[in-house]
Amino acid sequence: MNNSGSVSIVTGMCCDEEGQESKYPQGSDAKSSSEKFQSVYWRCAVVYFASSFRNNPKAQHILFTNADRTPNIENFNTAAFFDKIGVKVVQIPFTYQPPMEYYHAFRSTFFKFDIIKYLKNNSEMGDRCIALDSDCVWIKSADRMLADIEKNGLVTYDLYEPDDKKISGLTRQEMQKSMQI
């Protein structure tokens, strides 16, 4: 793989709309469409990019969201902060959304397919991308991960689960078949 391309560090912020909520067992009793619920994940995105920028200042940082705007978190101007550290906010629709009756939890997980599709259509050969959940904190540079991407082309982690185990209502084979990108 050619390392002459750009490095992008990305995450997604998929905001459920009223009537399209998901269940998140670790969350509060608040609906996933509520400001209270979503502000937790906006805070995570701020910390994710602040810590990445500190450790990876030369990388391009991109936040993908289906939200119409980047909200303030109480008195904190989120959009101004992202501008200051160079986070590009890309608004994309949530098109890989499963039907409401399909599965009740973690529906926003499928937003990752929209992110992958965007990256596929907007990247050049040699570009490298690290996409993590927004609740990660960067404590070191991405250099080791990038070296692994250079060596292997793709880096993921093993779930140590059988291929036919349902995750968010689908096996990995079913996800691959139904969500062709």
Image (spheres, helix red, strand yellow):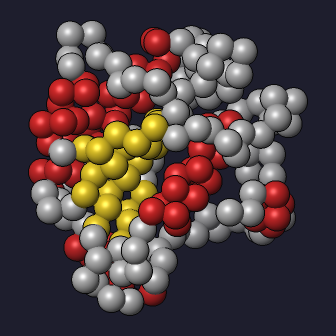
* Residue in view at x 42 percent, y 29 percent: 41
Number of marks in picture:
0
* Residue 149 relative to residue 59: left or right: right
Query: How far across and down, in percent of the image, does residue 121 sit?
Result: 52, 64
* Residue in view at x 58 percent, y 69 percent: 158
The C terminus is located in which quarter? Answer: bottom right
**Residue situated in front as seen by the camera: 170 or 17:** 17
Vertical placement of 160 versus 15: above or below?
Answer: below
* Residue 55 relative to residue 26: left or right: left
The N terminus is located in which quarter? Answer: bottom left
The quarter of the picture where residue 130 lies is: bottom left
In this orientation, does residue 40 appear?
no
* Residue in view at x 18 percent, y 27 percent: 80
In this orientation, does residue 147 appear?
yes
Query: How far across and down, in percent of the image, does residue 28 sit?
Result: 53, 16
Query: How far across and down, in percent of the image, does residue 119 sit?
Result: 48, 61
Vertical placement of 78 versus 106: above or below?
Answer: above
* Residue in view at x 65 percent, y 14 percent: 18
* Residue 28 relative to residue 123: left or right: right
Query: How far across and down, in percent of the image, does residue 77 sit?
Result: 21, 19
The quarter of the picture where residue 103 lies is: top right
* Residue 107 relative to residue 115: left or right: right
